């Protein structure tokens, strides 16, 4: 069995910590470099529910996309939500490793996995990483459709291909507009609006879109052709990365003869648990005005 330090070195090779944003908190949060690792669990969120799942599974290492502590702390007391996570991990000899913005921009990264879940052809990054001479790394991805779809059909495809959440997919813009190219970005994507406009795509699939940025974006038709917005649940847009990352680690394990057991959590950690459609203004298929 490999040591944690060996597995972490392999993960660092996939998602080097120095490629994370300066505000981010990635890398190993809990774990003894000398401990042996036989079983690994991938998940989006390092919440208690996931840690309990790792305990039940007998995992030695939990790899999450979101950091446990983004802004630092002065306590890991078990009376706090995050402290309890730390206690549970240490008590059960489970390490925690985080790959966040360094996994977003990786090649392949979070948005490749999102595009892959919908079977979209990736043409390149939406915001290329200046440090990558090959121009493959970066934030978001620009994708091409082999067969054009309406925005409504694209939303239905996303709803079908991404893991189910209470939110489903919200659409801004004309549901009947035709989409040939689109940008995708896992997680909160409204900071990428300028890049999406400049890319000249027909639609943008992301998460966490807010009223003012979204309404201003779809209303900006003077200088550009309209771009439809598809807003999925944050968790759902990043979960496909867990499967991609697990497959990458599996391949590394095979190459090294580590015989790791690599799992992906199917627990939905999206905080939204129910959704009531406004029946007087929406139809069942996709919120089209009556
Ligand atoms: Zn995220």
Image (tube, rainbow, N blue to C red):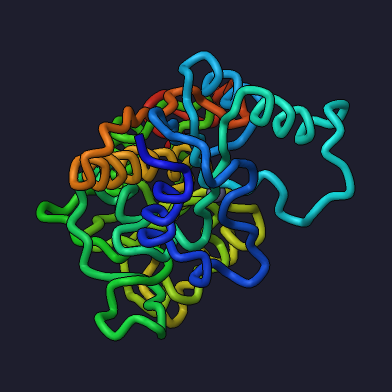
Q: Nearer the viewer, residue 260 or 187?
A: 260
Q: Quadrant of the image for the C terminus?
A: top left
The residue drawn where x is 31% and y is 44% is 249
Q: Nearer the viewer, residue 206 or 84?
A: 84
Q: Quadrant of the image for the N terminus?
A: top left
The image shows residue 51 at horizontal and vertical percentages of 59, 26
Q: Is residue 99 left or right of residue 210?
A: left
The image shows residue 48 at horizontal and vertical percentages of 66, 25
Q: Among all residues in the image, which is located at the extreme top?
A: 56
* Residue 246 in sight: yes
Q: Please say if 22 is above or below 45.
A: below
Numbered disc total = 0
The image shows residue 143 at horizontal and vertical percentages of 25, 61
Q: Among all residues in the image, which is located at the extreme left?
A: 146
Q: Is residue 153 left or right of residue 98?
A: left
Q: Please say if 22 is above or below 68.
A: below
């Amino acid at each position: 069995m490999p040591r944690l330090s060996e597995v972490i070195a392999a993960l660092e090779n996939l998602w080097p910590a120095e490629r994370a944003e300066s505000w981010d908190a990635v890398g190993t949060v809990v774990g003894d470099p000398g401990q042996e690792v036989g079983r690994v669990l991938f998940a989006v969120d390092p919440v208690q529910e996931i840690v309990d799942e790792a305990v039940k599974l007998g995992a030695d290492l939990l790899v999450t996309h979101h950091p446990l502590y983004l802004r630092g702390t002065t306590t890991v007391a078990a009376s706090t939500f995050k402290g309890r996570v730390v206690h549970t991990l240490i008590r059960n000899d489970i390490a925690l490793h985080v790959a966040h913005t360094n996994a977003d921009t990786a090649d392949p990264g979070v948005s490749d996995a999102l595009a892959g879940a919908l079977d979209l052809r990736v043409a390149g990054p939406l915001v290329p990483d200046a440090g990558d001479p090959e121009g493959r790394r970066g934030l978001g991805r620009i994708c091409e459709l082999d067969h054009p779809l309406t925005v409504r059909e694209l939303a239905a495809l996303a709803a079908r291909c991404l893991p189910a959440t209470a939110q489903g997919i919200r659409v801004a813009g004309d549901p009947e507009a035709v989409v040939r190219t689109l940008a995708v970005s896992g997680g909160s994507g409204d900071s990428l609006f300028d890049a999406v406009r400049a890319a000249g795509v027909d639609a943008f699939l992301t998460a966490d879109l807010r009223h003012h940025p979204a309404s201003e974006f779809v209303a900006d038709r003077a200088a550009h052709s309209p771009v439809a917005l598809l807003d999925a649940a944050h968790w759902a847009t990043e979960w496909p990365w867990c499967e991609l990352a697990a497959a990458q680690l599996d391949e590394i394990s095979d190459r090294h003869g580590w015989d790791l057991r690599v799992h992906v959590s199917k627990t939905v950690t999206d905080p939204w648990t129910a959704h009531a459609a406004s029946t007087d203004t929406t139809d069942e298929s996709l919120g089209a005005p009556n």
